[in-house]
Amino acid sequence: MKINKEYVKDTFNHEQNLIINDEGKNILVAGCAHKGITNILSVGENICNESFDYVIGGFHLFNPVSKKYEDNELITSIGFELNKRKTKYYTCHCTGTNAFKILKETLKHKINYLSAGTTIEL
């Protein structure tokens, strides 16, 4: 990020997430979770005072530019944290297929991968 002609580390404070409450279902649309999906979930749960039924978004565990994944232990620990909730997760591109496979081992049926053009019914 460039501020006053100098590059500084992006804090991602400009990122927004969407909370939808529809017919008794709480849905979080997280986009690309640069601040961490578990952090975003915690903030959203504090705002709603309850958990989410569905979370849709990339978990930012893969960098397509550098082609590097987050550490497998970190991905596994994120999976265990997400599994504490009753939530169903739909994740996308920046999670990465390898990270998705690791998360799937822990989350089983609670996580699905979305590709462009995929439709889901909540």
Image (cartoon, rainbow, N blue to C red):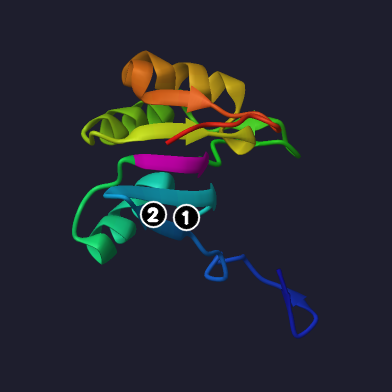
Q: Quadrant of the C terminus?
A: top left
Location of residue 76 by image quarter: top left
Q: CA distance from mark 1 to mark 2?
A: 7 Å
The stretch in magenta equals 54-58
42 left or right of 67?
left
Q: Is residue 82 above or below residue 24?
A: above
Please, is residue 40 above or below residue 6 in the view? above
Locate residue 75, reporting x and y percent: 42, 29
**Chain-order first, disc 1 or disc 2:** 1
In reply to whether residue 85 is colored magenta, the answer given is no
Residues at marks 1 and 2 touching, judged by CB atoms closer than 8 Å = yes
Q: Name the residue located 36 percent from the left edge and 53 percent from the top edge.
A: 22
Task: Point out residue 46 in the picture as x, y percentages from the top left corner.
Answer: 23, 62
Name the residue carrying label 2.
40
> Crowding at label 2, few (<14), some or many (≥20) Cα neighbours within 10 Å?
some
Q: Which mark is residue 35?
A: 1
Closer to us: 8 or 64: 64
Q: Position of residue 82 (x, y in %)?
A: 31, 35
Q: Residue 16: in sight, yes or no?
A: yes
